[in-house]
Amino acid sequence: MTTDGTQGNEFDALKFDLSGKVAMVTGASRGIGKSIALSLAACGADIVVNCNTGGQLAEAVRDQIRGMGRRCEYYAHNVADESEVEKMRDEIFRDFGQVDILVNNAGITRDKTFKKMTREMWDAVISVDLTGVFLVTKQFVDPMSERRWGRIINIASVIGEIGNFGQTNYAAAKGGLIAFSKALAREYARKGVTVNTVAPGFIKTEMTDAVPAEALKAVTDATPIGRLGLPSEVAAGVAFLASDAASYVTGHVLDINGGYAM
Ligand code: NAI
């Protein structure tokens, strides 16, 4: 007997098998989102890729996933724009019929000390990293609950837990995302939908390529594991949360940060 009461080997869930599921990953043209999309495809899911610009990066991810034998399309829409998100929902439901797993990964930074932070920098980060998650989740969570199975996985950041110099906007958005996820988890827990957050530490992507080398050295010095993380190490946590193995996990914040904060 499995955890959901169906017949089967109790260890089947440990295969993280997502065959027959459709997983949508926002911001999946590169970096952590790309790695998450590829990992969920490796687990057997068909993949909906979102990013704000299409082009070669998105096409390469799509082609790589198709090469793994999975269905994949990409949708170039801004998650912070409500009408674009609604258009994207219509296109995805037309093409895939449903979304079972939603990974809200798209995010941006606009770093400055608070003294120099402008209203535009504040609004830009809040609108993509927090409002974008609200807008996208709104389109997909209720259809999941109607089918009594769904996974929402939000990519926050260690910065949303402990703050960071020069990132008041980003810390507010990511801290807000953690709180949002816990509140949503309570609302959907009895409807078959789990809502969890992954909080990565400093991961080697183009986002951190923009961070000055001495700042990154200070981070690795303060990280017990002694290096930056890899996108695939974040994706592994997402694959667990997406799987049936995580059926009793909701409202959780999974730290993947090499021990940087604990
Ligand atoms: P990245 O900058 O390499 O990739 C960002 C992705 O988001 C791209 O695919 C881009 O097209 C997409 N995107 C940006 N704005 C968008 C919008 N308005 N609508 C749709 N898509 C949009 O970023 P990275 O490093 O891969 O980060 C991914 C997520 O992980 C972000 O939410 C970030 O805040 C978070 N994170 C990253 C860490 C790191 O060290 N790289 C650490 C902790 C969290």
Image (cartoon, rainbow, N blue to C red):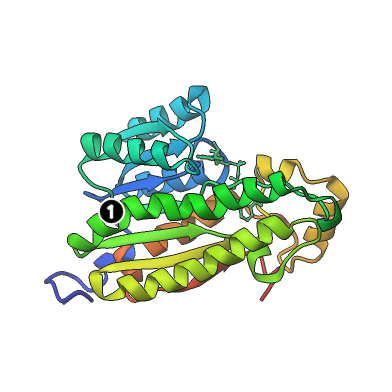
Asked whether mark 1 and ligand 1 are closer than 8 Å, the reply comes as no
- Looking at the image, residue 223 sits to the left or right of residue 16; the answer is right
In the image shown, does 39 or 150 lie closer to the viewer?
A: 150
Q: Residue at (27%, 71%) from the top-left corner?
A: 11
Give the residue furthest to the left: 7
Picture residue at 45% right of the left edge, 44% below the top: 26
Residue under the image location 37 percent in, 76 percent down:
186
Quarter of the picture holding the C terminus: bottom right
**Which secondary structure lies at badge 1?**
loop
- Residue 261 location (% of width, % of height): 69, 72
**Residue 95: quarter of image:** top left
Name which residue lies at 34% across and 73% down.
187
Q: Position of residue 92 (x, y in %)?
A: 29, 38
Q: Which residue is mark 1?
A: 100
| Coordinates of residue 133 in the picture (x, y in percent) | 47, 53
Residue type at the position of mark 1: Asp
Q: Does residue 130 appear in the picture of this structure? A: yes
The outermost residue toward the front is 119
| Residue 194 in the figure: left or right of residue 181 | left
